[in-house]
Image (cartoon, helix red, strand yellow):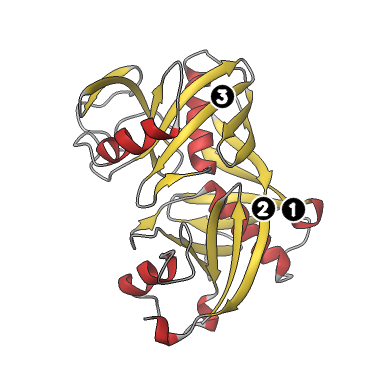
Amino acid sequence: MKFLKYHALGNDYIVMDPSEVKGDLSLEQIRCICHRNFGVGSDGILWGPSPSDKADFGLRIFNPDGSEAEKSGNGLRIFSRYLWDRKKVRDQPFTIDTLGGVVESQVRREGREVRVEMGKVNFHSNAIPVAGPPREVLRETIEAGDRSFEYCAATVGNPHCVIPLPEVDKRLACHYGPLLETHPNFPRRTNVQFLAVRDRANIQIEIWERGAGYTLASGSSSSAAAAVAHKLGLVDASVTVHMPGGELAIDIRPDFSIVMTGPVTAICEGELRLEMF
C-alpha cells in the first residue's frame, strides 16, 4: 500500500492511488492511517486518480474520522501536485471530479504553487444545506454553548458556517467549533470559520473542519470566508486569507465563482505495512 504525503500550509494529506491498493480502504483503515500515533498521521486521505466521465481525473476525499468530504481546496492543490509529480499532468490546466463538483486546476512554479477554480459559492439554505425555510443564510443568529453568534452559511461544494468577529483565535475555534459543526441547523454537519476582517484586502480565519477538527489551513474554508466577507461588503474581490499555517490568495468573480492560489510542499513517500492494522 504505497503512499505519498504532502502539506498545504500545514494541512497535510496522504495520497493513495487505488490502482496500487488491493480493494477499497475500510473505515477502520482510514482512521488508523490518519492517526498521528498509530498510523502515518494526516488530515485526510486523497484516494485517486480514478476514472471519471466528467473530468480528466476522479478523486475521493476521506476525513480522519472516516467520513467522506465533498471537496477540499488544500486537498485539491495537493492532489494536483501529486499528479504533476507522477507526470500525469504538466503546466496546462486539467479537471478533477469530486463529490462537490468538477474543478479546474493548474500547477505552477515547478509544482510549488497550484491554482484551482473552486466553483461558485452559494449562500442558499437548500444548497448548503441549512434547516428552515428556503433563504440566503446571511447575518442570522445561532446558539452554541454559552454564546450567541451572528453567522452566515455558504457552500463551495461542501458546507460552511462563517462567524464574523472583531478578533479570532485558536481557543475560540476549539471550544465552539465542535458545537457548531454538529448544530441541528446543519443536517450534514458543517465546516466552521471564525472570521476577522483586517482591511479591504485581508482577512484572518480560525478553522474547525468537519470530520477533522482544528485545522491550520483550509482552501474551501478560505474560499467560503472570503466570499462571505465580500457578500457582506467588507472586502474587495481579491483577498489574502491569513491562517495559522500561512496565506492563500482568493479571487472572487462577479458570479461568486472562486479562484484559489497557494503553495504545496512534498513531505515523504513510503509503503504502509499491514501490521499497522
In which quadrant of the rendered view does residue 122 lie?
top left
Q: Residues within 10 Å of mark 3 (few under 14, many from 20)?
A: many
Q: Residues at badges 3 and 2 in contact (C-beta under 8 Å)?
A: no
Residue 49 lies, with reference to residue 213, above or below; the image says below
Give the quarter of the figure containing the C terminus.
Answer: bottom left
What is the spatial separation of the Cα atoms under label 1 and label 3, in whole angstroms?
23 Å
In the foreground, 193 or 154 = 193
Tag shown at residue 203: 3
Q: Residues at badges 2 and 1 in contact (C-beta under 8 Å)?
A: yes
- Secondary structure of the residue carrying tag 2 is loop
- Sequence-first disc among 2 and 1: 1
What is the spatial separation of the Cα atoms under label 2 and label 1, in whole angstroms?
5 Å
Say which residue appears at 53% left-offset and 35% top-offset.
223
Residue matched to label 1:
112
- Secondary structure of the residue carrying tag 1 is loop
Residue matched to label 2:
264
In the foreground, 126 or 237 = 237
Say which residue appears at 38% left-offset and 71% top-offset.
32
What is the spatial separation of the Cα atoms under label 3 and label 2, in whole angstroms?
21 Å
Q: Say which amino acid is labelled 2.
A: Val
